[in-house]
Amino acid sequence: MTSDETRIRLADLGVGAGAFARGRHNAITDVPGVRVGHATVHSDRLHTGVTAIVPMALGAGRRSLPAGLAVGNGYGKLVGATQVEELGALETPVLLTSTLSVFRVADALLGHMLDQPGYEHSTTLNPVVGETNDGFLSDIRSRPLGVAHVKEALDTAAAGPVEEGSVGAGAGTVALGFKGGIGTSSRAVPVGDDTCTVGALVQSNFSGTLSIAGVPMPAEELICAPPAEPIGNSCMIVVATDAPLDARQLTRGARRAIFALRGVGSDFSQGSGDYAIAFSVGTGMPPADADLSPLFHATLDAVEEALVNSILMATTQVHADGNSARAIPLDGVRARLAAAGVV
């Protein structure tokens, strides 16, 4: 079931970008060579899928990219996390999916990578797969995702605009009382003498009270019904940049991505798995730490907007047993932003 409203993004509401301009598509794909694909499953009992974030720089000629990991709360199943933390390196695309399908998806990603040219003799590889729990809207115990869905997400990964909302790994997620999902955003930011891009993609599935541009948007007031409650509160955040940051600097950036959750109203509950992975496709010498503050600021803004977009773009979904997560009513959002003088 979907909302009758045409979904829109935060920028379409007239909310400004902040200190730094949005990228061309306002998406993680504004970072050169980064692509995104989805495999989505919607039926009466399943709302689930896979989302792939694919840095095209990875391959036989460049086996890893510098990466950093931040854990806001470790109640999750992030496959490959310890090696990213230890080595500061990303060896595969980052896949997002449903909690109980994460291990099947990781195995399928591993198989895909081992089949690539140049990997014929590989005896170790670290697939990175994150998850949130879509069990409120999907029969999660059936573990329906596997090789075909991973192949679809990877094969359809593309540059340009990114489909958001109730798609891919966000098909069955719930955020801040509304239907959550996949969201993305980007910023162009000065780093030293260069202008770089930082982009974020999120899979939102967490509790709290939504705030947009500092304006409270309580679900129980906007939808006039009990808010949807996520199972296994979690959020996965992926940050990409073409600034040539090293792993230590990327870890610092990933921490800022976690901080952005509070800006939209996350309550960081006990059972929330909140993770951020940041990677760089840049080459050259890392910038001085003294030049990183604008990039950190831009990361906060991009992640916060991506989180809001994940809700604004999501459509109502209903499970056959009666659970439902409603799309946020856009007229109510407009009215509250206008009343607060934001737009």
Image (spheres, grey):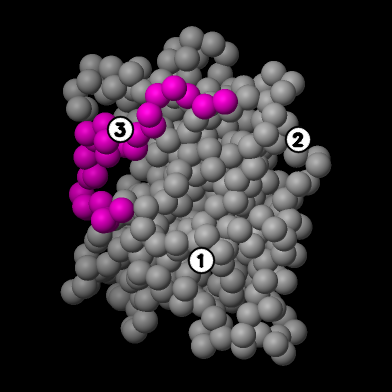
Percent coordinates x, y for residue 1 in the rendering:
57, 25
Dot 3 alpha-carbon crowd within 10 angstroms: few under 14, some 14 to 19, many 20 or more: some
The residue where tag 2 is placed is 139
Is 131 in the magenta?
no
On the image, numbered disc 1 is attached to which residue?
Answer: 54
Say above or below: 336 vs 66: above
Q: Nearer the viewer, mark 3 or mark 2?
A: 2
Measured as percent of width and height from the top left, residue 287 is found at: 31, 76
By secondary structure, the bulk of the magenta-drawn segment is best described as loop
Observer-nearest of 201 and 114: 114
Task: Identify the residue shown where x is 76% and y is 46%.
Answer: 144
Quick one: SS at disc 3? loop
Q: Which of the 4 quarters of the picture holds residue 319?
A: top right
Mark closest to the chain's N terminus, 3 or 2 = 2
Q: Residue at x 48, y 70 (%)?
A: 55
Specify whether residue 7 is painted magenta.
Answer: yes
Whether label 1 touches label 2, CB < 8 Å: no
In the image, what residue occupies the spot 62% across and 88% down?
Answer: 118
Q: Is residue 7 above or below residue 183?
A: above
Residue 114 seen in this snapshot: yes
User: In terms of image quadrants, where is residue 268?
Assistant: top right
| Residue 179 picture location, percent across and down | 53, 29
Identify which residue, 291 or 206, lies in the foreground. Answer: 206
Q: Quote the CA–CA distance across marks 3 and 2.
A: 35 Å
Q: Which residues are magenta?
A: 1-25
**Quick check: marks 3 and 2 in contact, CB under 8 Å?**
no
| Residue type at the position of mark 2 | Asp
